[in-house]
Image (cartoon, coloured by chain):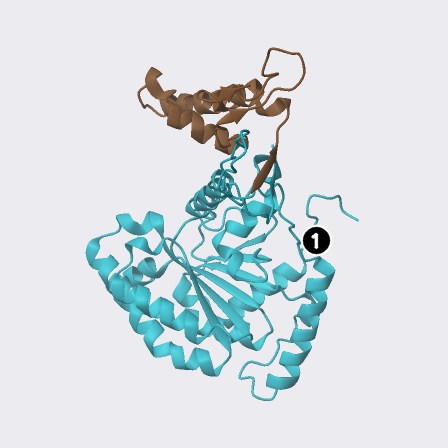
Amino acid sequence: MFSLRLPIPLVKTPPSSSSYSPYYLCPFHDPCQTRGLIVSKRGSATAKCHADVTLRHDRVSFAGESPDPFPAELAAEMMPKHVAVIMDGNGRWAKVKGLPPSAGHQAGVQSLRRMVRLCSSWGIKVLTVFAFSTDNWVRPKLEFDFLMRLFETTINSEVQAFKREGIQISVIGDSSKLPESLKRMIVSVEEDTKHNSRLQLIVALSYSGKYDVVQACKSVAKKVKDDHLHLDDINENIIEQELETNCTEFPYPDLLIRTSGELRVSNFLLWQLAYTELYFNQKLWPDFGKDEFVDALSSFQQRKRRYGGRHA
Amino acid sequence: MTLKFLSHADGREAVAKAANLVFVENLKQHKLGGELDLQILLEPQLNEALQIVGSKGPEPDLLLVYGPVRSHLGFPAWRHRYTEIM
């Protein structure tokens, strides 16, 4: 079916005195049906040029102030644009030290601060961290409540530093079950930092990869039902526009780091990790420091990424 | 005013496709342990499915047939239950 909406009003004139009475058509005001969306996907060359320009600018602007000079063993032009981290091992770190789990989470926050500073200094554009999974709701309520308060106090104490250092904060995940005060804080910090462009920190809170794909499919289905989209026009690009990582210019991580020695992606960015290089480290997250990060980046820079093709 | 152009695909073909969509959805629920509900093929479900396959539209009040034929020539049957034909 093809549908045209014409800007022609139906004029209703009173019937004439003639013996032939005209018929009046009733107007049907259905919305126009869009058979195809014009989807432009940025070419990798364009993105690369943009990244190069930004990278050079960052180094010129911040090199003198950088507390962490660029490591000599790494090549600046081969740095990943997007790094994703599964911050695993806080609980075990606390346990081996004879401390409660809350101490492990607090130490984990220090590790995250260090990671943010390093990414900011070394020209990485996006850092996505898996803070809390929808699958973590089974954890004890005491630990859950502590985590929620930890998120709030951390955001509260860091928001000024984020604004000052050009860090944009985005939070993805199913926020419906988060405490109201935390939701308000998230809205506020996202608004306050939305114009920052040095580093985008994406915090996955109450997130899982399956949830993200399901909610994207729901959005697409609703558009089809409301006649904004046709079934035959659904493709990868349409799905990608609805994933929660549509908040960033670089939604696909180049490098995923998982700490604590586990070799799983644990329902993190499932769709987005299709061609990501995976790096697993034995250290528990609170012990993951600068040296470990340099090792991960060095490993990444030695990879030969193929994206489905053969080796050159 | 909205002008809609129909084709053969919007007639019985669309209803068949929509019914298949409803059936597939129902079968999926059955495999997930839900009850296989034979009453699922209700009018709103089929209307919704027609919307999804892109062939839902308004019900006309008047259908004009030109020429000597005495048939609606495959005009979407789902849509002219109360339509006057002349």
- Relative placement, left or right, of A8 versus A264 is right
- Helix, strand or loop status at disc 1: loop
Position of A58 relative to A77 (above/below):
below
Q: Colour of chain B?
A: brown
- Residue A31: percent from the left, percent from the top? 52, 44
Between B27 and A78, the residue placed more toward the observer is B27
Near-viewer residue (A220 or A21): A21
Displayed quadrant of residue A2: top right
Q: Closer to the camera, A199 or A111?
A: A199
Q: Judge whether A128 appears above or below B64 on screen.
A: below
In the rendered structure, the answer to whether residue B84 lies left or right of residue A52 reads left
Q: Residue furthest right?
A: A312
Report the chain holding disc 1. Answer: A
Q: Position of residue A93 (x, y in %)?
A: 34, 62
Q: Which residue is mark 1?
A: A304
Q: Residue at x 45, y 20 (%)?
A: B81
Q: What is the x, y in percent for residue B24?
A: 46, 22
Image colour for chain A is cyan
User: At label 1, which amino acid type do we have?
Assistant: Lys
User: In the image as oriented, which residue stretches furthest toward the left?
Assistant: A142
Identify the residue at image location x=68%, y=59%: A302
x, y percent for residue B46: 43, 25
Residue at the extreme bottom of the image, as rendered: A64
Question: Does residue B51 appear in the picture of this structure?
Answer: yes
